[in-house]
Image: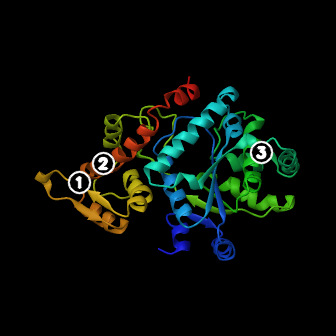
Amino acid sequence: MNKIDLIKRNSVEITTEEELNNLVKSKKNPTAYLGAAPTGKVHIGYFLQAAKIKDLVESGMNFKYLLADIHAYLDDRKSPMELTKARSRYYKEAMTAILKSLNVDTKKIKFVLGSSFQKKPDYIFDLYSLMGKVKVKRALRASSEVVRQVENPDLGSLNYALMQAIDVHHIGADIALSGIDQRKIYMLAREEVKSLGHNKPICIFLPLIGLNQDGSKMSASDKNKVITIHDSIKSMRKKINSSYCPEKNIESNGLLDIVKFIILPVENEFIISRNPKFGSNSKYNNIDDIYKDYKSGSIHPADLKNSVSNYFEKYFTTIQKHFKNKQKIIEEAYP
């Protein structure tokens, strides 16, 4: 796979492809970034971003991972201010562990704490400038799919979107990588930051994946269904086994999404493991063949669930080994 195809792989939208192509041609090692507000414990939904980070790093990009500690507080105080630093330390370890489990060279990832640059005068002045340009309704609309929606939102939810809009420039990135739920924030950024003298960010948007029937993205707040990276292997398998996976139906099938967006790009293959009583194992190298066999019934949901669990057992083993002597980091983040 060539460089540009690797960068674009499995994205649902790139704004704009022409700008991305020009950047890759003109700059040997562009810088991409992704921001995460350290709130709840990290779950398997984070493997999606990790798999894409792997693509970008292997394409030759520099990568910065923003630990958005101030954002974690501004989003309806999901993280109390006194816990934001501890949770940032935890997120750094959690993402390092996930990246290691996917064989990403973590030395090529630079973790940046948001408050390390978001308190500087030039950043604050840019924020004030945006506050004078962007209407309340526009800011609320931009953050509507990202921050917690309440009847009477506080000012933090407004500033959340404005800060994210200028983070790209101040962290020194050419490209913003994010889930498609953050599209409205980055469209605001592309519309407004030129007035501050900054370049418009190029945006690579990823899909959202979940294991529920409605296809909603995984959330740490769903205690009964979310699979955190600290779940036991037994618990992880049980939750995957109970996930929505209708027979012969590839629509809104979160497990097939996990295969497409995480396992196949990382492993370059996907093996369906069967009980010998029901046939031999099958190896696949592309998602279309998996879709075809799933729709025909050649792949049974139970075999799909078991096979996905096999890969995550391998990933979880690496992650939990990483955390073996780091339990204090978890305890300080979630006392």
Per the image, the residue denoted by label 1 is 273
**Horizontal relation, residue 65 to residue 249: left or right:** right
Q: Circle 2 — which element? A: helix
Residue 162, placed above or below residue 27: above
Q: Which mark is residue 117?
A: 3
Residue pictured at 58% horizontal, 41% vertical: 92
- Between the C-alphas of marks 1 and 3, the distance is 48 Å
Camera-nearest label, 1 or 3: 3
Which badge, 3 or 2, is on the more N-terminal residue?
A: 3
Which badge, 1 or 3, is on the more N-terminal residue?
A: 3
Most extreme residue toward the left is 277
**Horizontal relation, residue 162 to residue 2: left or right:** right
Quarter of the picture holding the C terminus: top right
Count of marks placed on residues: 3
Q: Amino acid at mark 3?
A: Phe
Q: Amino acid at mark 2?
A: Asn
Which badge, 1 or 2, is on the more N-terminal residue?
A: 1
Whether the residues at callouts 1 and 2 have beta carbons within 8 Å, the answer is yes
**Horizontal relation, residue 59 to residue 27: left or right:** left
Most extreme residue toward the top is 335
Q: Amino acid at mark 1?
A: Ser
Residue 15, placed above or below residue 225: below
Q: Position of residue 115 (x, y in %)?
A: 74, 40
Q: Circle 3 — which element? A: loop
Q: Which residue occupies the foreground of this view, 49 or 288?
A: 49
Q: Which mark is residue 310?
A: 2
**Horizontal relation, residue 304 to residue 193: left or right:** left
Q: Circle 1 — which element? A: loop
